[in-house]
């Protein structure tokens, strides 16, 4: 017996609602699982990003002169070749600060006080910084920045307890055999001497006591 038109419409609507509810129920679990998976993925990505920005053990920031002696250091440092202090700041800001830093910047184009303080600021006061003066040939027409660069580096070392001076300029001026004939790059003997100085300056850091870094 056929149902009256109105009653058939009502029954059909109820069946449609029940059908949609059943489908939604069947899909609800997979959708919840997908949502949870997305949350898990987001958490994992956030954790990976945090780990990526965690402090490095030791980083060497410098131009070709520092990179050239890197093989002699033997300290497992992350080496970053940079022609300017601004490049070093950008790299540190994106990667994270280091516990110890060896800095030799300025041979190519000098170093201003503002640039040096920017590098020091992004490294932070909990990082030990071994900062080297520069040595370039005695040609004031080409290299007008050596004196000012080294003044800035020496001043930083005097002002900050966590900055230790590696006075490469003074040492190589007294011992020219530590340089190659170009008057810039370290010789094999100079490479070893640089490494010994770095090792000596890194000793005893971090200081023992509450809040000291665990290297």
Image (cartoon, grey):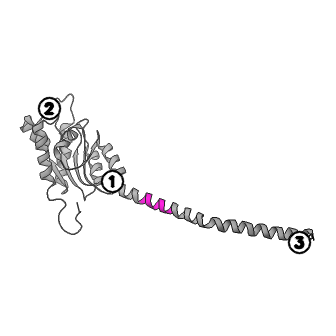
Image location of residue 60, percent across then percent down: 24, 47
Image location of residue 2, percent across then percent down: 92, 69
Q: Residue at x 83, y 67 (%)?
A: 12
Image location of residue 199, percent across then percent down: 14, 51
Q: Residue at x 40, y 57 (%)?
A: 48
Q: Secondary structure at mark 2?
A: loop
Q: Earlier in the sequence, mark 2 or mark 3?
A: 3
Image vertical order of residue 206 relative to residue 135, above or below = below
Decide whether residue 40 is among the magenta residues.
yes
From this viewpoint, which residue is outermost toward the left? 174
Going by the image, does 114 lie left or right of 28?
left
Q: Which mark is residue 7?
A: 3
From this viewpoint, which residue is outermost toward the front? 1
Question: Which stretch did the figure color magenta?
Answer: 38-46
Residues at circles 2 and 3 in contact by the CB criterion of under 8 Å: no
Q: Residue at x 20, y 43 (%)?
A: 70
Q: Nearer the viewer, residue 127 or 133?
A: 127
User: How many numbered discs, if any?
Assistant: 3
Image vertical order of residue 179 relative to residue 195, above or below = above
Decide whether residue 41 is among the magenta residues.
yes
**Which mark lies nearer to you, 2 or 3?**
3
**Which mark lies nearer to you, 1 or 3?**
3
Identify the residue position indicated by label 1 in the image.
96
Q: Earlier in the sequence, mark 1 or mark 3?
A: 3
Identify the residue position indicated by label 2 in the image.
183
Compute the Cα span from label 2 to label 3. 102 Å
Q: Quadrant of the N terminus?
A: bottom right
Compute the Cα span from label 1 to label 3. 71 Å
């Amino acid at each position: 017996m056929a149902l009256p038109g109105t009653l058939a419409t009502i029954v059909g609507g109820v069946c449609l609602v029940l059908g949609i509810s059943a489908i939604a129920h069947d899909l609800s679990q997979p959708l919840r699982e997908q949502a949870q998976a997305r949350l898990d993925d987001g958490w994992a990505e956030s954790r990976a990003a945090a780990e990526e920005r965690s402090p490095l053990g030791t980083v060497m920031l410098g131009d070709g002169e520092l990179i050239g002696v890197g093989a002699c250091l033997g300290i497992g440092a992350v080496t970053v070749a940079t022609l300017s202090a601004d490049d070093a700041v950008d790299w540190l800001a994106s990667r994270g600060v280091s516990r110890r830093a060896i800095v030799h910047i300025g041979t190519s184009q000098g170093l201003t006080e503002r640039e040096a303080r920017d590098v020091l600021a992004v490294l932070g006061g909990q990082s030990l910084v071994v900062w080297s003066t520069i040595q370039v040939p005695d040609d004031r027409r080409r290299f007008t920045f050596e004196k000012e660069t080294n003044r800035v580096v020496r001043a930083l070392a005097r002002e900050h307890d966590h900055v230790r001076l590696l006075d490469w300029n003074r040492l190589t001026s007294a011992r020219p055999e530590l340089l190659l004939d170009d008057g810039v790059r370290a010789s094999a003997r100079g490479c070893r001497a640089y490494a010994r100085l770095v090792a000596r300056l890194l000793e005893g850091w971090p200081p023992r006591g509450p809040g000291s870094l665990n290297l």
